[in-house]
Amino acid sequence: MSSLIRSSSLTGFPTLVRSLGGDPDALLRQAGIRPEAIDDPDEYVPYRSLVMAVDLAAARLGQPDFGLRLSAHQGLDILGPVGVIGRHAASVGDALDRIAQFLYQYSPAVEITFETTGPVTNYGFRLRPRVQRTLTDLVQIGELSLGLSLQIFRMLIGPDFTPLSVSLLHRPAAPTAVHESYFGCPVAVEQDHWGFRFPADVLDRPVEGSDPTVRRVVLEYLSGMAGGAVGHGLPSEVRATVKRALPTRRFGLEDVAENFALHPRTLQRQLSTHGTTFQEIVDDVRRDLADRYLRTTTMPLAQLADVLGYSEQSSFTRSCRRWFGCSPHTHRAATAQPPG
């Protein structure tokens, strides 16, 4: 199953392609994307198709820096509600925390990290291993994502923000000078990650125009979509950990036990004293989240299966038949909440 991403990830694509003398609709169709999808903020497209569309444009238009150019047309708004909570975070560090926490609702294919070492913070992003294994050429999508990261930082901090240095996982097709001009700093190629370095004190800067009321409302919405822990004690803590980890695929017994500094058998034994098992908790979390998403969103079923940690949509469908006695489509039709 291909991971999905919001169609807003192609914001600016038609405008840029036309300005370079190309036909955006033809390129999108060849990549398996309906041109109308870009205008629907609630629609998702296969991540593979996004990569193909950007690669095709770069090749057909003779623009080796196409991904970088496209990033200049984008910003925080393409993340939807995740972008809203970033825009209204208390500080830049809080914004990055929240974006990283809920980024899977934009696309489970991507994750971001940032780590402070002394006076410098290292920001980076990567494609999840399952996605990266299915994609051969990541030059354009990597540069688009890194360029978008720079645009987001400038929206949070100010237009004058410049990284200390930039790292590219690949060797770019365009001259390195093009990238150094875009980012305004030295660029190192063929590194072990995509990312950039910036002064650590940037994390403490307030986000200009942040509204705490909007932040609270959107956080409640996004947290509600992810579900919250109920009750107290070890089962509740394990439940909350599994909920956070489902989209990352790191929710196995060993992964969760490590989070609690316990041996997997010890965690199972302690859960048994509460009358439950690890697998029962995982299944219960998935059922509750599936019911919530099916009732309250129009998220495509393939995307929902991905968010719930399933490697195949068919496995999700079998689980729904076991939980609800019907397919996910039927359950959604019978329980969907009316808009408004």
Image (spheres, rainbow, N blue to C red):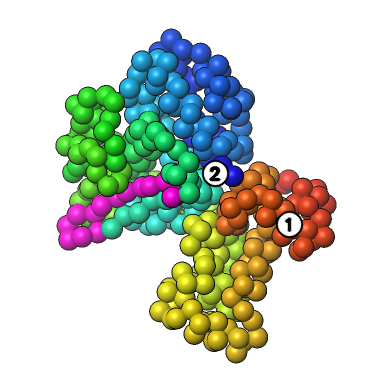
Residue 67 figure quarter: top left
The residue under the point 40% across, 19% down is: 59
- In the displayed structure, 305 sits above or below 279; it is above
Q: In the image, which disc is placed on residue 318? A: 1
On whether residue 120 falls in the magenta region, the answer is: yes
Q: In the image, which disc is placed on residue 306? A: none
Residue 293 rendering spot, x and y as whole percentages: 67, 54
Q: Is residue 287 left or right of residue 261?
A: right
The residue under the point 36% across, 15% down is: 62
Q: Residues within 10 Å of mark 1 (few under 14, many from 20)?
A: some
Q: Is residue 176 visible?
A: yes
Are the two marked residues, 2 and 1, in contact with CB atoms closer than 8 angstroms? Answer: no
Residue corresponding to mark 2: 3
- In the displayed structure, 283 sits above or below 76; it is below
Q: Which sits in the foreground, 8 or 315?
A: 315
Q: Which sits in the foreground, 250 or 213?
A: 250
Q: Residues within 10 Å of mark 2 (few under 14, many from 20)?
A: many
The magenta stretch spans which residues?
116-129
From the image, state whether disc 2 or disc 1 is nearer to you.
Answer: 1
Amino acid carrying mark 2 in the image: Ser
On whether residue 6 falls in the magenta region, the answer is: no
